[in-house]
Amino acid sequence: MVNYRFLSSNTVKAVGLICASVCAWYMGYLFAEILPEDSLQTAIGSMQRIVDKPVIKAPLPMRQKCAAWRTCSSSEVVYRIRSGGGKSILPDICLEDEILLGGIKKTGDRGINIAVVNRETMKVTDTKTFDMYEGDFSGSMVEFINKIASGSIILVASHDDAYSKLSEDAKKVFESLGSKEVRNLKFRSQWVLLAIKGGTVPENIEKEKIIHASDNNRYWGWPAEIQIAGCLPK
């Protein structure tokens, strides 16, 4: 036997659902006819942008001159002096983003490496390497330094060994340039120095470092690199 009460209840629900669907379709059609097409597209685009997650891009790192991580003023130049390391890593001397010795130039060698810069033009005038392990080159190195024009910037970086054939006269000439560590050199010590011939380097910047060879470093008894960097007044 058919339950007419149940049937009439379901019929009312079905009719209501059909009416609601027709009304929703009609309202959508009416809304589309009234609203301009470009406004509709703008609204849809805005909703999509809200849903989309914002993409945060990290700023590119600022490239520093000589890779020294120093920001110098217009009245200064950036310098970096790095000694050699191990048996085969050559020293690297850079001034105002110009490689003076080593690096891509593949210059420099065992001993004491010297770059000379004219302080007025900030251009390199000479580079020399003096072997302090084999042969006697201390005399020629002293003669070279003595002939450097007063006021010149002198940048020194050792490689492998700067001690074995370093004479007393050579130590004195480096002391005259302001070195405090030249007498502390030992076999295969690494050493870097910034000096001004006939002048003084400001006290507040790095101008000299020394490190001794050790069996505990990554080169198993060969010396490790050492570096100084900073801003030098023009």
Image: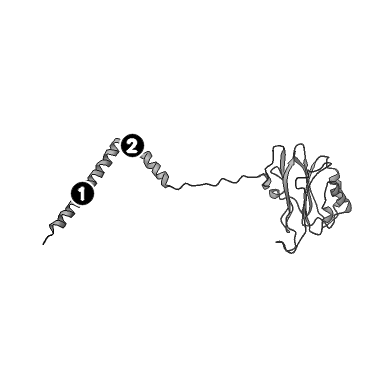
* Residue 92 makes an appearance in the image: no
Q: Position of residue 8 (x, y in %)?
A: 15, 54
Alpha-carbon distance for marks 1 and 2? Answer: 32 Å
Image depth: mark 1 or mark 2 in front: 1
What residue appears at the point 86 percent right and 46 percent down from the top-left corner? 176
What residue appears at the point 36 percent right and 36 percent down from the top-left corner? 39
Q: Label 2, on which residue?
A: 37
Image quarter of the C terminus? top right
- Between 1 and 174, the one nearer to me in the picture: 1
* Residue 9 makes an appearance in the image: yes
Q: Position of residue 139 (x, y in %)?
A: 87, 50
| Kind of element beneath mark 1 | helix
Image quarter of the N terminus? bottom left
Q: Is residue 131 above or below residue 40?
A: below
The amino acid beneath tag 1 is Gly
Q: Is residue 131 left or right of residue 43?
A: right
Q: Position of residue 230 (x, y in %)?
A: 72, 45
Neighbour class for label 1 at 10 Å: few (<14), some, many (≥20)?
Answer: few
Q: Is residue 212 left or right of residue 36?
A: right
Question: What is the count of numbered marks?
Answer: 2
- Between 222 and 141, the one nearer to me in the picture: 222
Neighbour class for label 2 at 10 Å: few (<14), some, many (≥20)?
Answer: few
The amino acid beneath tag 2 is Glu
Mark carried by residue 56: none
Q: Label 1, on which residue?
A: 16
Q: Position of residue 115 (x, y in %)?
A: 77, 46
Q: Is residue 7 left or right of residue 87?
A: left
